[in-house]
Image (spheres, rainbow, N blue to C red):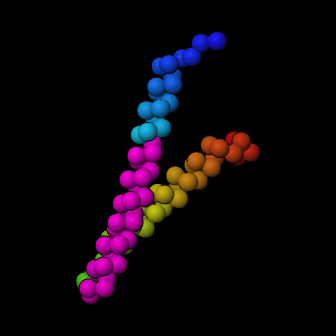
Amino acid sequence: MSIDWGALGVVSIVTLIGTVFVVCVVSCAALLMDLSHARAQAGRPAGAMRAGAAALVGCCAAILLFGLWLIIPYFH
């Protein structure tokens, strides 16, 4: 039995990049939600920020559903 170290490295790098991407999307969504809430409390318009936050939350939901599709063999 031999270990394919190259494949293990590729899987590790892709996992790290995917994790950083998901964390960035979620944190940007939370930041935009917070900023839009602060602008609304200050009486300034926050429609664009709120729309951006909603789009990023939609991306988070799409990432979640894609992950479930990958994990659950029934959906294939």
**Relative to the observer, which residue lies in front, 1 or 17?**
1
**26 over 42 or under it: above or below:** above
The answer to whether 27 appears left or right of 74 in the picture is left
Image coordinates for residue 30, horizontal then vertical, percent = 39, 66
Q: Residue furthest bottom?
A: 43
**Relative to the observer, which residue lies in front, 71 or 62?**
71
Q: Residue at x 48, y 38 (%)?
A: 15
Q: Does the segment drawn in magenta span residue 40?
A: yes
**67 over 32 or under it: above or below:** above
The answer to whether 71 appears left or right of 24 in the picture is right
Magenta span main SS: helix
Q: In this picture, which residue range is highlighted in magenta?
A: 18-43
Image coordinates for residue 11, horizontal then vertical, percent = 50, 30
Q: Residue at x 34, y 66 (%)?
A: 31
Image coordinates for residue 26, horizontal then vertical, percent = 43, 58
Q: Residue furthest top?
A: 1
